Each structure stands twice: as C-alpha cells, then as structure tokens.
C-alpha cells in the first residue's frame, strides 16, 4: 500500500510539473513583445477544413493587393502554440513583407497545439495518435489554390521549434510540394528517434539555430523543456546541415559573417551556404537562444538570447526570390 501511494504521488507530481511547465512556456511566449502592431492594410481570416475526420483550422493574412498566381508562405507555431501566438512571435514580419511583396501568409494550427513531427519518442497527442499533418498541409495548399488562386509551385514553409521539426517531416515526405523550407531552432532526430522515412530527395532548405539555445541544443543531444525529455535526442546543427548538403551532392560552400546591425557585439550571424542543384544553408545565431531572429521582436529571458542582426522573414524571401528568378 505504501509503495502504491508513493507511485501515485510521483505520478501526480509528474503531472503537476508537466502542467506547470506548459504554463510557464506559454506565458513566456505571451511575453514575446513585437516592436510594431499588426499591419492594418490586409485582412486576417480563419479557415476550416476536415482531414482524416478531424476539423482543422488555419489563419490567413491576405495583403491589400494580392494577385492570382501569388506565392504562399506557411508559418508553423511551436509546442503549446497557436496561430495567433505565432503572428506575435514573428513580430508580424511576414505580414509586413506580404504587403510589400504580394504573397499570402498562412498560420496553420497544430492538433491540440502540437505537430506530429519525426521525433518518435515525443509524448504529445499529435504524435501518439499519429496525426497526418503532412496530409493536412497538402489539403491546405489545395484549398488555397481554390480560394485564392495561389501558385502551388511557389510554396514556402517555415516553423519554429516543434514547427521547425515539422519542416523536416515535409522535407522527408513531401519534398515535391514545397519550393523552400526554413526550420527554426530545430535539428533532425538521431536515427533511433526518427520515425519518418526519407524519400531521399534533396530540397532547398535554410536552417536557423542559436548557439545558446537551452531547449534544442545547437550541438545536438537531448531536447528538454522544463525537464520534459520525451522529445528525445537530436543531431547537431552541423550534422543536420551536412545531411541535406550531402543529399544534394554539393561540394560548393561559402561562409559569410553577416553585417552587425544592432550594435550588440555579443550576438552575430554566420551563414554557411551550399549552392548545388539546391540551396542548403545554415545560419548560426551566435549567442542566440530558442528564438525567431529579428530586430522587430523581443523574447523573454527564458528563451536565452535575442538576435537582431537578421530579419529572418526577409532572408527567407531573398532566397525564395533567387529560386524564382528566370535564368537564361
């Protein structure tokens, strides 16, 4: 009886700590502070669709001037996240850029605030129920073609943390459906923790990781969120970059230290870029934490280091633009 009570107590403590961890993490995201308010020119709408008998939602920012055949940028939230929180966590950067460049911005909503990424050991419901988020993504593209006449050959997807892990799943399983992927603060799982099967197809991919990230370590290892280690072990940023570079059979590489922009010499950005058949790039956010890097947003101290020397949305768009320019 004493042993049973002890086990029950430990279980209750574990549940309480998990709930507290979720609360702190969500509270930290709520305390992400954008420099600007959301743009007023466009429209922000919520859409629904049914996939695998589950009602799913996604929010769409429609810029004031959107033409038929426009690109679409998907922005995936992280663990415990929502579409609305992701708007804030990116400082509305993609929406301001959409007003300037004329593309659609989509913030999908995960299943019970999570994505079914490739980490086999993850204990959230999206993974435990094997939710088909790749199928959900494809169905969103189809719906956007119908509703907004987007160009389905110009689809860009980015995501942070759990959303960044979802980028790797799309790269493995749906490379033909995305022109450019940009995982943020995430690296691919080690083989023993990876339940995705790669198609072996090379992709255009931009990886943004911080050297001071205490949740998803730059050097790889155990991903831990307030002591919750269920997400398992992941590879290093360098090995993740090398995996996609080798898949492209590229021997070309350029290393560039980006210009210092914010006067904070403690943080900087180093870009390694390989241009073979595909563009593969690793952006090392020196002293950057578990954050979206931009001068237009301030993360709480929990995330351990803002980086303002790069506007991630503009960098992604720049690479996207280079891929869509007609070459002679």
Image (cartoon, helix red, strand yellow):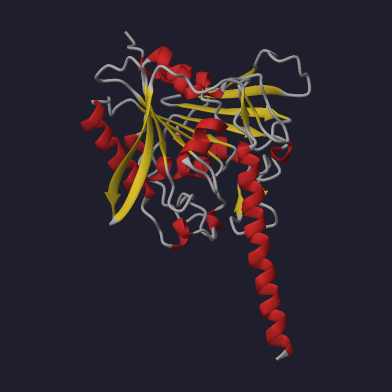
Number of numbered discs: 0
Quarter residue 256 falls in:
top right
Quadrant where the image shows the C terminus: top left
Let me know if residue 130 appears in the view: yes
User: Where does residue 113 sit, x and y in percent of width and height?
Assistant: 48, 49
Q: Residue at x 42, y 21 (%)?
A: 320
On screen, residue 72 above or below 177:
above
On screen, residue 295 above or below 115:
above
User: Where does residue 246 sit, x and y in percent of width and height?
Assistant: 50, 35
Quarter residue 240 falls in:
top right
Point out the residue furthest to the top here: 328
User: Where does residue 27 sit, x and y in percent of width and height?
Assistant: 64, 44
Q: Is residue 178 left or right of residue 6?
A: left
Q: Is residue 98 left or right of residue 123?
A: left
Q: Residue at x 45, y 56 (%)?
A: 126
Point out the residue furthest to the left here: 146
Q: In front: 328, or 65? A: 65
Q: Residue at x 47, y 18 (%)?
A: 96
Quarter residue 170 falls in:
top left
Q: Residue at x 52, y 24 (%)?
A: 274
Let me know if residue 229 appears in the view: no
Point out the residue furthest to the bottom here: 1
Quadrant where the image shows the N terminus: bottom right
On screen, residue 255 above or below 245:
above
Q: Is residue 209 left or right of residue 159?
A: right
Q: Is residue 241 left or right of residue 287?
A: left
């Amino acid at each position: 009886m004493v042993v049973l009570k002890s086990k029950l107590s430990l279980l209750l403590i574990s549940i309480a700590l998990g709930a507290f961890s979720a609360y702190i993490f969500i509270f930290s995201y709520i305390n992400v502070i954008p420099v600007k308010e959301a743009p007023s020119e466009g429209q922000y709408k919520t859409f629904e669709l049914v996939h695998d008998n589950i009602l799913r939602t996604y929010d769409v920012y429609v810029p004031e001037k959107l033409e038929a055949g426009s690109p679409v940028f998907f922005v995936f939230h992280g663990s415990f996240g929502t579409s609305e929180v992701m708007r804030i966590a990116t400082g509305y950067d993609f929406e301001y850029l959409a007003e300037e460049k004329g593309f659609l911005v989509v913030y999908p909503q995960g299943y019970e605030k999570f994505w079914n990424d490739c980490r086999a050991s993850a204990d959230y419901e999206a993974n435990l129920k094997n939710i088909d988020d790749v199928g959900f993504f494809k169905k969103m593209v189809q719906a956007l073609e119908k509703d907004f006449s987007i160009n389905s050959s110009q689809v860009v997807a980015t995501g942070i943390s759990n959303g960044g892990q979802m980028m790797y799943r799309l790269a493995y399983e749906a490379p033909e459906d995305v022109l450019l992927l940009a995982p943020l603060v995430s690296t691919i799982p080690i083989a023993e923790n990876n339940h995705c099967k790669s198609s072996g197809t090379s992709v255009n991919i931009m990886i943004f990781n911080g050297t001071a990230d205490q949740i998803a370590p730059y050097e790889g290892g155990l991903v831990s969120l307030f002591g919750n280690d269920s997400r398992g072990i992941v590879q290093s940023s360098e090995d993740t970059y090398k995996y996609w570079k080798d898949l492209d059979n590229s021997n070309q590489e350029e290393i560039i230290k980006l210009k210092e922009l914010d006067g904070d010499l403690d943080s900087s950005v180093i870009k390694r870029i390989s241009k073979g058949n595909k563009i593969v790039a690793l952006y090392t956010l020196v002293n950057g934490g578990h954050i979206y890097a931009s001068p237009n947003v301030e993360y709480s101290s929990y995330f351990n280091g803002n980086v303002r020397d790069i506007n991630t949305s503009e960098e992604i768009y720049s690479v996207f633009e280079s891929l869509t320019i007609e070459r002679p």
